[in-house]
């Protein structure tokens, strides 16, 4: 049995967004799916949670625009210490160039805002799939 693949609901997800409504909705949906969810509202708080948890998160759902820094820089910094940590970047300002930059930086998935529950659940499940 491949122990790197966890059944749905046994994954730990950090959601990072400064929009309280988006954060609450995303947390609620992921909780309902059975995931263990933690939240942060800034890049600094996200990095502190990632460090405190010693990279135990299976996925970080990270807004590209945060009050203190760009999400892509949070991802780059966290991946220096935890290179296997998966990131799904969320952006309301998607262009082909931005998406390409995010994927080149290591995002496993990019999700455009606004998104609905179905788009979120599909994106998270896809982002958690084992790498080929």
Image (cartoon, rainbow, N blue to C red):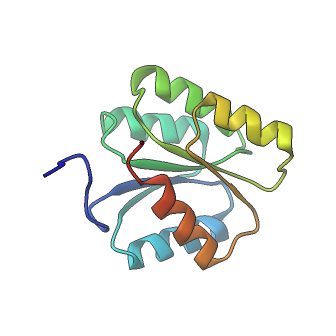
Going 52% across and 71% down the picture, which residue do you hit? 121
**11 relative to 42 in the view: left or right:** left
Going 84% across and 51% down the picture, which residue do you hit? 93
44 relative to 93, above or below: above
In this view, the residue in front, 36 or 24, is 36
Q: Is residue 70 visible?
A: no
In this view, the residue in front, 6 or 74, is 6
Count the labels in the image: 0
6 relative to 28, above or below: above
Q: Residue furthest top?
A: 80
Q: Quadrant of residue 50?
A: top left
Percent coordinates x, y for residue 92 in the rendering: 80, 56
Image quadrant in which the C terminus is located = top left
Percent coordinates x, y for residue 41 in the rendering: 58, 51
Q: Residue furthest left?
A: 1
106 relative to 18, above or below: above
Going 45% across and 70% down the picture, which residue do you hit? 30
**93 relative to 78 in the view: left or right:** right
In this view, the residue in front, 66 or 83, is 83
Q: Is residue 76 visible?
A: yes
In this view, the residue in front, 20 or 73, is 73
Going 40% across and 79% down the picture, which residue do you hit? 32
**14 relative to 107 in the view: left or right:** left
Q: Quadrant of residue 21?
A: bottom right
Percent coordinates x, y for residue 40 in the rendering: 52, 51
Percent coordinates x, y for residue 7 in the rendering: 26, 64
């Amino acid at each position: 049995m491949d122990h790197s693949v966890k059944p749905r609901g046994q994954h730990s997800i950090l959601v990072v967004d400064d929009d309280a409504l988006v954060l609450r909705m995303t947390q609620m949906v992921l909780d309902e799916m059975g995931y263990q969810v933690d939240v942060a509202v800034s890049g600094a708080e996200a990095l502190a949670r990632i460090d405190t948890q010693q990279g135990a998160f299976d996925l970080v759902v990270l807004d590209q625009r945060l009050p203190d820094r760009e999400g892509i820089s949070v991802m780059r910094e966290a991946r220096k210490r935890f290179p296997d940590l998966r990131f799904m970047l969320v952006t309301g300002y998607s262009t082909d160039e931005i998406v390409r930059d995010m994927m080149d930086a290591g995002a496993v998935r990019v999700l455009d805002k606004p998104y609905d529950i179905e788009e979120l659940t599909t994106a998270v499940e896809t982002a958690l799939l084992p790498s080929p």
